[in-house]
Image (cartoon, grey):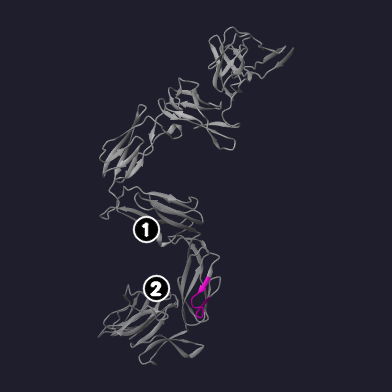
Amino acid sequence: MTLTQTEPVRPPCGRPARAVLRLVAGGALLSASVSPLAAQSIAEVQVTPETMTLGVNQRQNIFAAAYDRQGNLVPSAPFTFWSSDTLIARVLRDGTVVGVGPGLAKVEARVRSRRASLAVLITGGDSVLVPPGSVLTLDPTAVVLLPGERASVAAHAVLEDGSPVAPGRITWKTLQPDVAVVDSHGVVTGVGPGRSIVQATSAGGLTAASPVAVEPAEFALSRARLSIGPEGAETLRALVPSQGNRPVRSGIQWHSSDTSVAWVGSGGIVTGRAPGQATVTAAGFGQERSAAVTVHRAPEAFVVSPPAAAGPIQLPVQGTREVSAIAEAADSTPIPDARLDWTVGDSSIIGFDAATRTLRGKAVGSTTLAVRLGGFDPVVWTVDVIPGLLALDSSRLGLGVGARATVAARLVDEAGKVLGPASGLEWSSDRPEIARVSGAGTIDGLSPGRAVITAKAPWGRTATAEVLVTGELMVSSNRSGAFGIYQLRAAAGDTLIPILVDSASNLQAALSPDRTRIAFSSNRTGSYDLFVMDADGRNLRRLTSDPGNEGDPVWTPDGSRIVYAATPRGGLAQIHSVAPDGSDARGLTASPGGNHSPDVSPDGRSITFASA
């Protein structure tokens, strides 16, 4: 005779553990429970294990224990055992479960009015109709239903390598018919709240099971509003928010308030028929939910900006850019209700706010933004997010021959806000014989003329600056007939370089403080007026147009104004000033004797002039 202690049966929470002893004598198994205190009334029954899996003809003991209200083990409780399906599993008087045939059964241990149960799965069989190693699986692996809702469960047999095999005829059953029932085709119907198990058994003895939960809950519609065009279609779905927003599989009746505007099918597919408004209602499970449907005019054009064919949209990190997409009717008026579907290729590179149609750069890289309108091909933009837009601190500068200046490159956003310095740039000059540039943006003026300096970033963005190189002196000469304006280099005093030489008399040239512009007096319009031009003679602009004569131009130190003498017909000269673009002309003196030959102090606060 051998005495062994088995795994303890777990008592109710907070109660002392009780041991179950097995006494083996001559191959017979006897069970006894040991308790420090006996009780007469039974309050609870427990069984171990909670679930069991056996093969056909295999057997295993279950262990049952009874407890009174104080948690004391009731010794010698008169247990009886019961099986829900003896063609699947039998249970002997001593609690031994024997596998009979493939399937799922429930086994109970009963004593007086108390009972405890476990699920027993019997696998395999004496005759195998499917290849060895086959496994039966169910899809879905778990089912959640509303009371009255139906769902289909499919059984599939596969080999170990995943290749399918024919499972043969499938037999279906549920463990708790008061919770859910299943028909011969695997359609499960929720009956009442609770949990059950649906089991499938193949003709070859393969078995699989899925848990079923039936829970009352409210459903909602996937969208509260729909906007579609005539002949357009959208799908409304009934969802259960408290169950992970799963779709309701059956039991929903759909209705449209105006089928001449919008029609809805049994699957929730809403089809537009004519412009107007309608309400689509979903009813089922004692509930009703509605969605507003707008059927808009049919779009005849799809207008986007910028055009996708114009090339990639370049966007700096943290920079923004607006795009637009408008559906238009036949009369070119917009259709604001037309549904546009926006898609971002990689949301780690760009973000997009569909409400404001605003792109925002997140990280350096390239991705796409797409917009779709029903009935039209999708529009797809390529969006390149770059470290920043490239800008130079000066877009125009003047140098004397032999002079040097440095321009700084910066990264800016779309609004021009500085993001930081730019580095790794490639610098070049289109006229290196006039202005030469080094890798640090340092420019050397070599000879009179105009050059364009370009800074190019590694991602392809460029920024440019115009450089005007001039001689040391500006002079007027009539060597070609009429007086023209020339520049003169001190190192080559016998060489005059023409700037403006034509049939008019051009006199009194004054170079701007930044050496990029020249103010002068010319009679090309009849009387002598003031003009301004670039330092190389381009972009001539008239500043004054009074009937008299204007001359003696001189720049203020900051280059913001030109001071000059104006002599009206039959009058005396007085001092005036004007902005370099010809605006904001002002009279500065009105002395009876007249004033001329102005000059401006280095700090720009005073003007000297000759007065009669």
Residue behind mark 1: 305
- Look at the picture and state if 289 lies above or below 539: above
Residue 356 position, x and y percent, is: 38, 51
Residue 476 visible in rendering: yes
Q: Where does residue 317 sit, x and y in percent of width and height?
A: 49, 56
* Left-right relation of 568 to 512: left
Q: Nearer the viewer, mark 1 or mark 2?
A: 1
Residue at the outermost right position: 1
What is the quadrant of residue 323 in the picture? bottom left
Q: Residues within 10 Å of mark 2 (few under 14, many from 20)?
A: few
The answer to which of 237 and 87 lies nearer the viewer is: 87
Q: Is residue 257 above or below residue 311?
A: above
Q: Quadrant of residue 68?
A: top right
Position in image of residue 338 (x %, y %): 32, 48
Tell me if residue 11 can be seen. no
Q: Nearer the viewer, residue 562 or 441?
A: 441
Q: Is residue 15 left or right of residue 218?
A: right
Dot 1, how many residues are within 10 Å of its Cα: few (below 14), some (14-19), or many (20+)?
few
Judged from the image, the secondary structure of the residue bearing numbered disc 1 is strand
Give me the residue at 29% from left, 39% from top: 263
Q: Residue 7 is drawn in which quadrant?
A: top right
Kind of residue sitting beneath label 1: Ser
Helix, strand or loop at mark 2:
loop
Q: Is residue 406 above or below residue 571?
A: above
Amino acid residing under circle 2: Ser
Can you tell which mark lies on residue 560? 2
State the CA–CA distance, disc 1 to disc 2: 38 Å
Q: Which residues are magenta?
A: 427-436
Residue 213 within the magenta-colored segment of the rendering? no
Rendered-image quadrant of the C terminus: bottom left
Compare marks 1 and 2 and give the one earlier in the sequence: 1
